[in-house]
Amino acid sequence: FVGAGFLSAAVAGSVFASPSAEQVFRAIRRVGAAQPQRGVLVVIMNYTGDVMHFGMAVEKARAEGIRTELLVVGDDVGVGRKRGGRIGRRGLAGTVLVQKIAAAAAARGSSLEDVHNIASLAAENTATVGASLAHVHVPGRELVPDELGDDIEIGMGIHNEEGFGRVKTDLPGLVKTMLAQLLDQSDKDRAYIDVQPSEQVVVMVNNLGAISALELGAITAEVVDQLAGTYKLTPTRLLSGTYMTSLNGLGFSITLLRVVDKSFVSLIDAPADAAGWSPPVQPQSWERGIDTTNSEMEAETETREAQDFAPSNLT
């Protein structure tokens, strides 16, 4: 996600592990030196190692005089309030939307404070739930037999963390359960966002790594259909693709971003040139009716034939 209109830098550790505080600090210093008057916003997911190491790096950067802010995103509803406790929710694919909004705001020239505020607002109104058919195997580590069998684990984290529970169901049943975790206001342990039919919502269906394009399309269609049928919600923007994987995870996640600020949509729509980013689809792209008759095609064919056999007027 590093590129024009998106992130200025990214710092990665080993697989499923945080980078060191020193690595993060060096990245902050390099980005801060490029435009010292602008400052640096560090956006991370809520995992203990990341919070510790990135937090230490931010404090070190501030001590060196670099204007730096830290935003920790926790959008997972698989971990409810009771289990989350003081640690809070884990970070999942919704983090990508928060980063996109922050990056687009920065590209428009917004101040560090304003970028931090709009990104924080987006993070507060984002919810994600994932589901997977299997745990992933980290290369170089011992292969542990998967105990899921035919079960689907709902709420599994991207690092194989334990989810909410296991079910045996088909795709409609799975999507129904996942959307209920995102939107059921009677579940006080997980009712993090309350999206009303009159409000706008951005929807992301994310491939955890091993879902084919055909399968992801079917999943996305089911999500959109159930949002419309059960919750009377039509996505203002729809993102479907591979945004945040769990290596070759055999599953997907659903993210909802409640549009509480009208700038969210324009910031998500803003141009970005980054390998991991696929732009959203607008409503008219899937709401437009398809003419199943041949009338339009026949008319176009007749027009082409008339043009093909028209006199050339050449002498």
Image (spheres, helix red, strand yellow):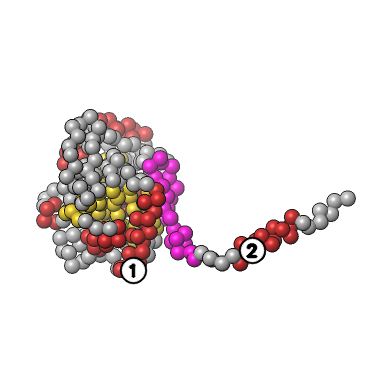
Q: Position of residue 40 (x, y in %)?
A: 30, 40
Above or below, 131 against 233 in this view is above
Residue that appears at 69% across and 61% down = 303
Within-10-Å neighbours for mark 1: few <14, some 14–19, many 20+: few
Residue at 45% across, 48% down: 271
Q: In the rendered image, which residue does mark 1 sit on? A: 229
109 on left or right of 62: right
Task: Tell me the number on the disc at residue 288.
Answer: none
Q: Read off the residue under disc 2.
A: 298
Classify residue 199 as left or right of residue 77. right
> In what element is the residue under mark 2?
helix
Q: Quadrant of residue 81?
A: bottom left
Q: Residue at x 25, y 51 (%)?
A: 131
Q: Does residue 60 appear in the picture of this structure? A: no
Q: Nearer the viewer, residue 242 or 173?
A: 173
- Compared with 229, 168 (above or below) is above
Q: Give the Cα separation between the discs numbered 1 and 2.
A: 35 Å
Residue 15 sits above or below residue 89 on the image? above
* Amino acid under disc 2: Glu
Q: Specify the quadrant of the image occupied by residue 201.
A: bottom left
User: Is residue 229 highlighted in magenta?
Assistant: no
Which stretch appears magenta? 262-289
Query: SS class of the residue under badge 1?
Result: helix
